[in-house]
Image (cartoon, helix red, strand yellow):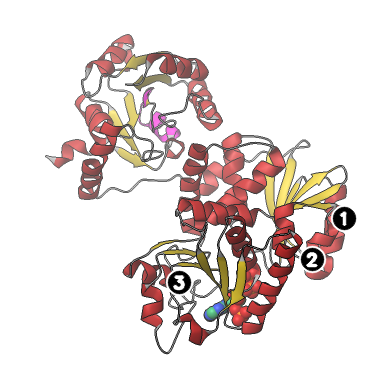
Amino acid sequence: MIERFRPDEYVASVSDIDFDALWGKGIRGLMFDIDNTLMLFDTDTVPVPVKEMFARLKEKGFTVWLLSNGRSERVESIKKQLQVEGTSRAAKPLMFGYKRLLKQAPDLKGKVAVIGDQVFMDAHLARRSNSYGILVRPISLEHDEKQVKARRKAEARIIRKLGIVPKKLAASKDRRADMRIDGNTTLFGVIGDPIGHTLSPVIHQILIDHINENYAYIALHVKKEGLEDFIKGAYAAHIAGINVTIPHKQAVMKLCCRIDPSAQLVGAVNTLKWTPEGYVGYNTDVDGFSHLVQLAKVPVKGHKVLILGAGGAAHSAVAVSYLMGASEIVIFNRTQDKAKALVKEFQDRIRQRGDKDTRLRTVSAENLVKEEFTIVFNTTSAGMAPNVDMLPVSLAEGEETFYSQIRFALDMVFNPSETAFMKKVRQGRGTAVGGLSMLFYQGIRSFEIWTGKKFTYQESESMFRSFMERAENCV
Ligand code: ATR
């Protein structure tokens, strides 16, 4: 019974379909579902990589059709953008949409692959129409139509029962195909020491692939003593944008011609943009962290926030809490003197801005349990792989009470994706969000600053999903 839903292939996205192999199997016609397979339901512009894929398919000799239940003007416009032979209102779950298209090319009988994201609508109908069925994981579940949303649960059960997992083409294969470096390539990069484990090239390659410009992004190992020479050389060589990571985030400030106000507030720069006057310094960790706060719907405004840690990452958390209007910012750090220094640093900066409303103070380990903290941001590295069992706060007494009182927790650690701290909070009353989306979003912001491109929420979400998949293989 369940077998009639089994697709011939299940892939992570349309770019993971091995069309050469399909051609080898004798497939000559491709029938694509549009919504959530090729592009998001509520967008009208076809993404550039999809356009390119269609051009390649036609060049190879495939006959390509579109099939959709969607509104006809939109489908017409998509058809035009993709220059395809035919479209049909699918009238799913009925068969006639498929049949009508198949009738247009009788010689392709038995040589057609149906490609779609719904088990019932696409994979099952492919089987019934004697076509080759390729099930594609939907681009985004959030943007499904209501009736589709309801079906997804049943579909997920069937996929589980069939025991199938989405296939991805080897990353190296599609990366090589996409890579294009020539005399006009605009170069971006990240510098740090060490730099071997950075995920920034993975993030930026996803963004570059998405907009398909002649850009390249590389990681460069720059030591402290080489920083100034590097920046001068990079500027002369017109490197258009540079991400800066540990240990250079403060030192690079004096090499900038101007510093953006939020970077000034944090006291650190993680993004440089080439301008005719010199490199301008920005801090997109702040944008990344505010994205995380908004994503988790943390009610910072008017509330007390506890920040764990007093290093570089804590600076972004303090700045965001301040900018979002926290009534009180409390710092706890294993080494108390560093917490005190951080408070002093921000008190001075906040005073310079003429603000008297936000209180900043430190708290000691013994006093942590004497008050209630419901909003807690972890900026320490405790719990990061390989020390996955380590908690940012370990107390001889009252530890359970401390964790059980937390309602909202953000953890800047992104490896593992669920940390020991997040688990503790979730076991109690709280919701907890990890740092992977912060990392991705700070990358998006840097890229936007460099290129002037603005990504929509939907674009960011769908690229974040690809990032999560690639990050799983990297971290
Ligand atoms: P980053 O720039 O990522 O914040 P950092 O400047 O080295 O890195 O700061 C790391 C922070 O994590 C510090 O606050 C550090 O505490 P100390 O100042 O006492 O060193 C904190 N930290 C690291 N490991 C920790 C652990 N196992 N438990 C608690 N705090 C820890």
Residue 271 makes an appearance in the image: no
Amino acid, disc 3 = Phe
For residue 330, side relative to residue 18 (left or right): right
Give, as a single range, the part of the protein colored magenta.
Answer: 19-32
Name the residue tied to disc 2.
251
Q: Up-down: is 25 above or below 204? A: above
Q: Residue at x 51, y 55 (%)?
A: 292
Q: Secondary structure at mark 3?
A: loop
Which mark, residue 373? 3
For the N terminus, which image quadrant?
A: top left
- CA neighbours of label 3 inside 10 A, class few (<14), some (14 to 19), many (20+): many
Q: Up-down: is 98 above or below 325? A: above
Ligand 1 within 8 angstroms of badge 3 C-beta: no
Q: Earlier in the sequence, mark 1 or mark 3?
A: 1
Q: Residue at x 25, y 28 (%)?
A: 126
Name the residue tied to disc 1.
232
Is 322 or 43 nearer to us in this picture? 322
Please tell me in which quarter of the rendered image ligand 1 is found. Answer: bottom right
Q: Secondary structure at mark 1?
A: helix
Ligand 1 within 8 angstroms of badge 1 C-beta: no
For residue 473, side relative to residue 346 (left or right): left
Of labels 1 and 2, the one closer to you: 2
Q: Residue furthest left?
A: 1
Is 248 or 89 nearer to us in this picture? 248
Q: Residue at x 83, y 66 (%)?
A: 226
